[in-house]
Image: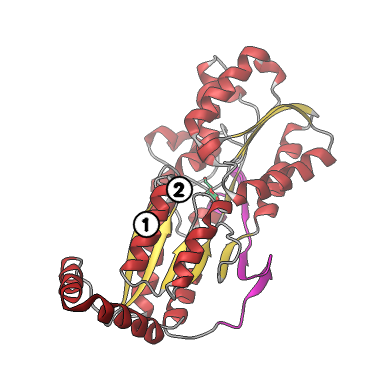
């Protein structure tokens, strides 16, 4: 819904609340530095353990909105992986008059009530990165392709049919099911033997480390020829478990990842992680900001594609290995050579030709 229509509704509610309610609203606005005539876009992200959200998604989105719209406010929330907290944050955003709600859900399947609350209040809901049924718009990367690329990279690096340990993402994250399906399509086709598989709640790196440690009590490290980790946070836990159990850093099996976190890029340069998936978050955050600004101005975009019945934008993921660190994350300015090649990694960078 466009901002002008939305404001009419807000005024209607205020009139019902009466004079006392109005002064309370005014005080609230003043406290938060709010401007009644400003257009409000709420951004709700799911967690802060994965570095992308606070380091990239939030600042990039806010910067782009500021560039495109001088009278737009961004009202920001992070749910810290807590679904109930996120529901309250949606209520808060709605009560502060958000015209557009950009929501990256902790639990995709459980977010229907939040979408309904927001839409009932006249806001437009954009599902950001994770799909939500009945959202008005959706933006993400091609998640099944992410999983397939991870699986194919493992098949290639393992040069062997197993055994593999498989750490999938959180069962509450709809993307995780797509990564898993994509990875299985490549691994199953190649006949890779999976020793054990785990859907890791909350994508927790600590759980990943503990689970890998538990597998080392069942299997000899020499039987583990590869580890599928759905994201870099988990890959870090896997490396810690394996090296903690005495596997030398230069004898680690191929391990996958996703998110192109700085620590993962450093592990890739040092030969401790096989690959990661780089999703240029700027493309996603910029497009979400453009879309939110267009919607707040009452425009209807015409360049969407359909994904499960929702008007969508789907972007292409990129594989990063030691060979293309320079041409991907460095070239894009996602990280500088100085970020990656700290003292600890200077020799590895030199050996890998990253300077
Ligand atoms: C996914 C998202 C990934 C990553 C992951 C948690 O839903 O697509 O980029 O953030 O959650 O690591």
54 relative to 310 in the view: left or right: left
- Ligand 1: does it lie within 8 Å of the C-beta at label 2? no
Measured as percent of width and height from the top left, residue 118 is found at 45, 67
Q: Distance of mark 2 from mark 1, alpha carbons?
A: 10 Å
Rendered position, 311 above or below 194: below
Which of disc 1 and disc 2 is earlier in sequence? 2
The question of residue 313 being in magenta is answered with yes
Q: Residue at x 60, y 42 (%)?
A: 171
Measured as percent of width and height from the top left, residue 315 is found at 61, 64
205 relative to 192 in the view: left or right: left
Q: Quadrant of residue 235?
A: top right
Give me the disc on residue 48: none
347 relative to 225 in the view: left or right: left
Q: Residues within 10 Å of mark 2 (few under 14, many from 20)?
A: some
**209, 117: nearer the viewer:** 117
**110, 256: nearer the viewer:** 110
Q: Residue at x 51, y 43 (%)?
A: 265
Q: Give SS at disc 2.
A: helix
**Circle 1 is placed at which residue position?**
89
Q: Which residues are magenta?
A: 301-327
Rendered position, 284 above or below 299: above
**Circle 2 is placed at which residue position?**
83
Q: Quadrant of residue 250?
A: top right
Q: Residues within 10 Å of mark 1 (few under 14, many from 20)?
A: many
**45, 23: nearer the viewer:** 23
Q: Residue at x 62, y 76 (%)?
A: 304
The question of residue 23 being in magenta is answered with no
């Amino acid at each position: 819904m466009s901002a002008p229509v939305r404001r009419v509704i807000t005024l209607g509610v205020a009139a019902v609340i009466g004079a006392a309610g109005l002064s309370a609203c005014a005080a609230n606005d003043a406290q938060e530095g709010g401007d009644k005539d400003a257009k409000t876009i709420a951004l709700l992200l799911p967690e802060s353990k994965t570095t992308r959200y606070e380091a990239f998604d939030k600042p990039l989105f806010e910067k782009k909105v500021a560039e495109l719209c001088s009278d737009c406010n961004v009202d920001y929330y992070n749910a810290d992986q807590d679904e109930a907290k996120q529901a309250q944050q949606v209520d808060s955003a709605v009560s502060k008059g958000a015209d557009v709600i950009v929501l990256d859900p902790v639990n995709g399947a459980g977010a229907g009530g939040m979408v309904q609350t927001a839409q009932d209040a006249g806001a437009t809901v954009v599902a950001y990165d994770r799909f939500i049924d009945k959202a008005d718009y959706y933006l993400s990367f091609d998640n099944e392709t992410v999983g397939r690329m991870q699986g194919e990279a493992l098949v290639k690096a393992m040069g062997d049919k197993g055994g593999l340990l498989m750490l999938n993402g959180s069962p509450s994250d709809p993307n995780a099911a797509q990564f898993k399906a994509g990875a299985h399509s490549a691994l199953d086709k190649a006949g890779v033997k999976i020793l054990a598989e785990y859907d890791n709640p909350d994508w927790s790196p600590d759980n990943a480390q503990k689970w890998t440690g538990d597998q080392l009590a069942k299997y000899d490290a020499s039987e583990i020829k590869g580890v599928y980790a759905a994201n870099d946070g988990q890959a870090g836990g896997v490396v810690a478990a394996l090296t903690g159990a005495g596997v030398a850093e230069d004898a680690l099996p191929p391990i996958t990842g996703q998110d192109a976190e700085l620590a993962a890029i450093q592990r890739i340069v040092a030969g401790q992680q096989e690959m990661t998936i780089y999703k240029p978050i700027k493309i996603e955050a910029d497009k979400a900001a453009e879309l939110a600004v267009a919607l707040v101005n009452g425009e209807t975009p015409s360049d969407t594609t359909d994904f499960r019945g929702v008007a969508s934008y789907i972007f292409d993921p990129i594989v990063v290995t030691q060979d293309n660190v320079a041409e991907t994350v460095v070239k894009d300015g996602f990280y500088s050579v100085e970020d990656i090649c700290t003292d600890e990694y200077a020799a590895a960078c030199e050996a890998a030709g990253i300077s």
